Amino acid sequence: MKSKIVIPIIVTVSIVGLIAWKLVDNKQTIDRNAELSLTVNTVVPVMVEKPQYIDLSEKISVNGRIDSENEVAVYSKTQGIVIRKHKKAGDVVSRRTVIAQLENNVIRENIRLSELDLAKAKKDVERFQNLASIGAVTVRELEDAQITLRSIESRITDLQDQLCNTTITSPASGVINKDYFEEGTLLSVGSSVIDIVDNKALRMYANVTEKEVLKLKTGMEAVITTDVYPGSTFTGRIEAISPKSNDQYYYSVELVLNHQGLRPGMFATAIFNVDGNNRNTPVVSREAIVGGMKDPQVFVIRDSKAYKVAVQVGISDGEYIEITDGISPDDVVVKSGQINLIDGTEVSILNL
């Protein structure tokens, strides 16, 4: 009876012991494989570069609209019906080019009649002066005759000015952007006649932030690009910077442009290069920096091992960054593969 009880117990203990032994053996195998894995993968492949000495500058890019420096609106100075339209929208005009002729027969007739009155008034003044010299007329009568003469002279001057204004001329050179009349149109004093745009003098107006405006100054040049001419660049120069921001805290910058091919109304981009780097300080790829910009570091290769070095950085153009302290020109810096590195890791260089 006892043998029947002991045998199952012995079997059970044997099975448990076998399972425990197997688990311990598996754990030892896993540990050995892990150690082997660490032994095999101690060398980390990386890409490296040497510091460069290149021109590096921060770029400020702003968008704006191109306008003409000289835009002139021409208005009628007298009233009359247009009897001849000499120029229309799109025509090129010079200063004093005749734009339109208004009807002026009535004015000419009034001038003719006024000139007759003027001749009579002159004779009256002369006669009154002779009579006044012998006391035949009073001084008041002589003064009235002189006042009449001056009044007629003033009227003739006004009529001649009106006659001159019936011929509407261009006050400036340029291209007529728009006209507001046709032959037969009745123009009143102050009526719009044409708008003139000078394509030879162009300006660009753009808005910059309060941080950007501190880096700009008058006389600074900019590269101008536009989608109308892809691949082409133009030049501009800062003429003025507004001393005060608008309601959105933007400052207005006015640039004078070279005008070859550009036209008023085009949308353009101005690119300013500011804060150029010192050519005596090295530059590395932006991706070589680890630890962020608050605590910048790079990995330097020495005796086939990577060592983390703290550096001080300067300006960046997005692709490269200036290193003002921390590395020498002869250092080899890890450009990619840093994610697998710790201080003192052995490396294999893939691009050398």
Image (spheres, helix red, strand yellow):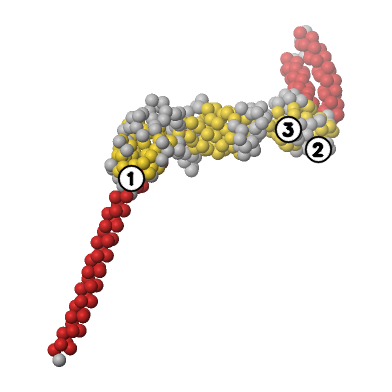
Helix or strand or loop: what does disc 2 sit on? loop
> What's under tag 1, amino acid-wise?
Val
Disc 3 residue crowd, few under 14, some 14–19, many 20+, Cα 10 Å: many
Q: CA distance from mark 2 to mark 3?
A: 14 Å
Res 176 label? 3
> Residue drawn at (83%, 29%), measured in percent from left and top?
104
In the rendered view, would you say 135 is above or below 51?
A: above
Q: Position of residue 148 (x, y in %)?
A: 77, 21
Q: CA distance from mark 3 to mark 1?
A: 75 Å
Tag 1 residue: 43
Precedes in sequence: disc 1 or disc 2: 1
Res 278 label? none
Disc 2 residue crowd, few under 14, some 14–19, many 20+, Cα 10 Å: some
Which image quarter: residue 227?
A: top right
Tag 2 residue: 182
Q: CA distance from mark 1 to mark 2?
A: 86 Å
> Residue drawn at (26%, 59%), measured in percent from left and top?
31
Which image quarter: residue 190?
A: top right
Helix or strand or loop: what does disc 3 sit on? strand
Query: Between tags 2 and 3, which lies in front?
Result: 3
> What's under tag 2, amino acid-wise?
Glu
